Image (spheres, helix red, strand yellow):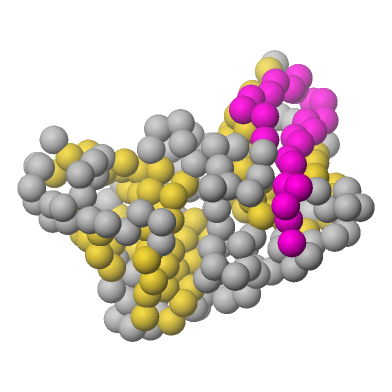
Amino acid sequence: DGGITQSPKYLFRKEGQNVTLSCEQNLNHDAMYWYRQDPGQGLRLIYYSQIVNDFQKGDIAEGYSVSREKKESFPLTVTSAQKNPTAFYLCASSILGASYEQYFGPGTRLTVT
Amino acid sequence: DAKTTQPPSMDCAEGRAANLPCNHSTISGNEYVYWYRQIHSQGPQYIIHGLKNNETNEMASLIITEDRKSSTLILPHATLRDTAVYYCIVRVANYGQNFVFGPGTRLSVLP
């Protein structure tokens, strides 16, 4: 089955620790995205990448970092500089072009205490 | 900021049509209207999208007004499994390839 996988589904960390969230897709999509969702809110874009070895900041990139070494993988690191890291994180991918939809993974719920 | 306006919540009786409105009065000529839905604690699911013409697929119909300033998503026979938050999105074509998600409409399908 083609799709997007995110692991793990639930992640717990202590404050001050960096944590990396995994996102893998086998859809052969060029573009990949990371969003953050807080309770009762819409999604906010953290980073996106349209091609391997290139990525752009979204609306709320501070405290996060990404890499895109392979087309199918786009890991997100939540650093200790992120002031409020507890949230639901969603990864998506798409074919390039405004007429193509994004496909979303199941999400990772990160809790930092 | 999201370029769309949606009611925060709606109810619909099971088996009836659910009509979800969306205003996008500042839409540009080359921007698409997309609809997604999100069931609690899951990733958003694509429903349908359109540019000018009305569209229909196995999940829903999308009606876009002639001036493109508003649209309506129609779920023809709502079931309890259609209870979700529905997002209307105008694709910001000149900002990478990104979607801007607002708070959406929480649809509750009632038995």
Q: State which quarter of the image contains the C terminus of chain B.
A: top right
Q: Residue at x 8, y 47 (%)?
A: A16
Closer to us: B18 or B3: B3
Q: Position of residue A57 (x, y in %)?
A: 37, 66
Closer to us: A72 or B50: B50
In this view, the residue farthest toward the right is B66
Q: Position of residue A11 (x, y in %)?
A: 22, 45
Residue A21 is a magenta residue: no
Range of magenta residues = B6-28
**Left of A61 or right of it: where is B92?**
right
- Res B38 quadrant in image: top right
Q: Position of residue A52 (x, y in %)?
A: 38, 83
Q: Residue at x 60, y 70 (%)?
A: B94
Q: Residue at x 57, y 76 (%)?
A: A96
Image position of A108 with respect to B75: above or below: below
Closer to us: B8 or A11: B8
